[in-house]
């Protein structure tokens, strides 16, 4: 078999027969449908882009807020109780040492 | 094509950008030619109708991007049609079909002073079968669609000299086989 398939036709196709396939209404309908799909796709793309921008903006705000709270100066507080116990912690609530005099000498498991 | 006709087509294209219904005039004008062009490359009426619709739909979709490049608007349609046909063959992975009209072959043979009989036709078919597809495309556009080389170059996305070269090579082989006196530009 050759590179191409060559066929010989007796006659040209008549214009009447070609006209049977002519249908501009169908082309218009398909075009309008395509345009509608394209418009919806465009709106969806814009929506996604806006959503991503809002999420990035929100993430940056949260990150900034966290940065500012972590930079606040913290005071080291040491409390001594009447029963001999003591507790050391930063002002932001992180307990460093909590121990009782009685347990300091023998048991250190209470130290947190 | 006269300058007035080109300007008229331009005004239709301008209107089509805002109102797709205006494109209908160009559809009516070129439908037969594009249909025949595709049919020659498929030999299947239903497939041709599909590809033809797709061609005009693609043209309508891209009408906003159309720019004048020194060739008539019809060349742009032929280019889209040619791409649609190529896309179809790539997808189906089939051998390209060329369905040519006996009447047109007879006309060309008469022009070239070559006798027309079954044996000559058979030899011609065998010759065309072995011809590279890109050369066949050039011959089809030149001798069956009556396109000039500038248009052929635009349609096939090659240079004008490249189009001439392909036609020249194809006809050179044809001349050797058939003792034709036809020149690559179609004149004797």
Image (cartoon, rainbow, N blue to C red):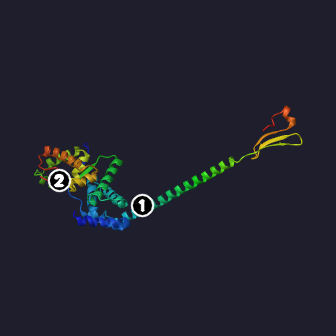
Residue A9, image x and y in percent? 22, 54
Query: Residue at the location (26% across, 47% down)?
Result: B134
Which residue lies at the image location 49% right of the left edge and 56% below the top edge?
A45
Mark 1 residue element: helix
Q: Chain of mark 1?
A: A
Q: Residue furthest right?
A: A83
Residue annotated with mark 2:
B105
Q: Quadrant of the N terminus of chain B?
A: bottom left
2 and 1 marks in contact (CB < 8 Å): no
Residue B73 rendering spot, x and y as whole percentages: 28, 60
Q: Which residue of the protein is positioned furthest toward the top in this rendering?
A: A106
Regarding residue B11, the answer to whether it shows in the image is: yes
Nearer the observer, A22 or B167: B167
> Disc 2 sits on a residue from what chain?
B
Viewer-proximal residue, B146 or B68? B68
Q: Taking the image as drawn, is residue A9 in sight?
A: no
- For the residue carrying disc 1, how many other residues have a C-alpha within 10 Å: few (<14), some (14-19), or many (20+)? some
Q: Give the mark count.
A: 2
Pair 2/1: label in front: 1
Number of other residues with Cα within 10 Å of mark 2, as a class: few under 14, some 14 to 19, many 20 or more: some
Residue occupying the point 23% across, 62% down: A14
> Residue B66: which quarter of the image?
bottom left
Compared to A68, does A17 lie above or below?
below
Q: Position of residue B104 (x, y in %)?
A: 18, 56
Q: Secondary structure at mark 2?
A: helix
Are both tags, 2 and 1, on one chain?
Answer: no
Q: Which residue is mark 1?
A: A34
* Left or right of B146, for residue B19: right
Image location of residue B45, percent across then percent down: 30, 57
> Is B129 situated above or below A23?
above
Camera-nearest residue between A5 and A111? A111
Q: CA distance from mark 2 to mark 1?
A: 41 Å
């Amino acid at each position: 078999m050759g590179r191409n398939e060559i066929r010989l036709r007796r006659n040209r196709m008549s214009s009447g027969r070609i006209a049977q396939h002519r249908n501009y209404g169908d082309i218009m309908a398909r075009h309008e449908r395509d345009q509608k799909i394209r418009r919806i796709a465009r709106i969806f793309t814009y929506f996604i882009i806006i959503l991503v921008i809002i999420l990035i903006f929100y993430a940056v705000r949260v990150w900034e807020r966290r940065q500012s709270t972590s930079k606040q100066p913290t005071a080291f507080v040491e409390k001594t109780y009447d029963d001999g116990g003591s507790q050391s912690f930063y002002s932001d609530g992180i307990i460093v040492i909590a121990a009782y005099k009685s347990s300091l000498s023998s048991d250190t498991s209470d130290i947190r | 094509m006269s300058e007035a006709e080109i300007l008229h087509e331009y005004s239709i294209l301008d209107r089509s950008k805002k109102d797709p219904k205006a494109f209908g005039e160009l559809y009516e004008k070129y439908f037969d030619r594009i249909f025949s062009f595709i049919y020659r490359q498929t030999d299947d009426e239903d497939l041709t109708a599909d590809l033809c619709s797709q061609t005009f739909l693609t043209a309508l979709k891209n009408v906003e991007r159309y720019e004048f490049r020194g060739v008539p608007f019809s060349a742009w349609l032929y280019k889209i049609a040619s791409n649609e046909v190529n896309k179809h063959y790539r997808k189906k992975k089939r051998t390209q079909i060329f369905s040519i009209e006996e009447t047109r072959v007879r006309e060309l043979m008469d022009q070239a002073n070559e006798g027309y009989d079954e044996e000559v036709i058979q030899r011609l078919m065998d010759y065309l079968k072995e011809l590279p597809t890109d050369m066949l495309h050039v011959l089809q556009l030149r001798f069956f669609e009556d396109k000039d080389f500038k248009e052929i170059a635009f349609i096939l996305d090659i240079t004008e000299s490249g189009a001439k070269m392909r036609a020249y090579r194809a006809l050179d082989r044809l001349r050797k086989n058939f003792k034709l006196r036809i020149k690559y530009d179609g004149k004797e």
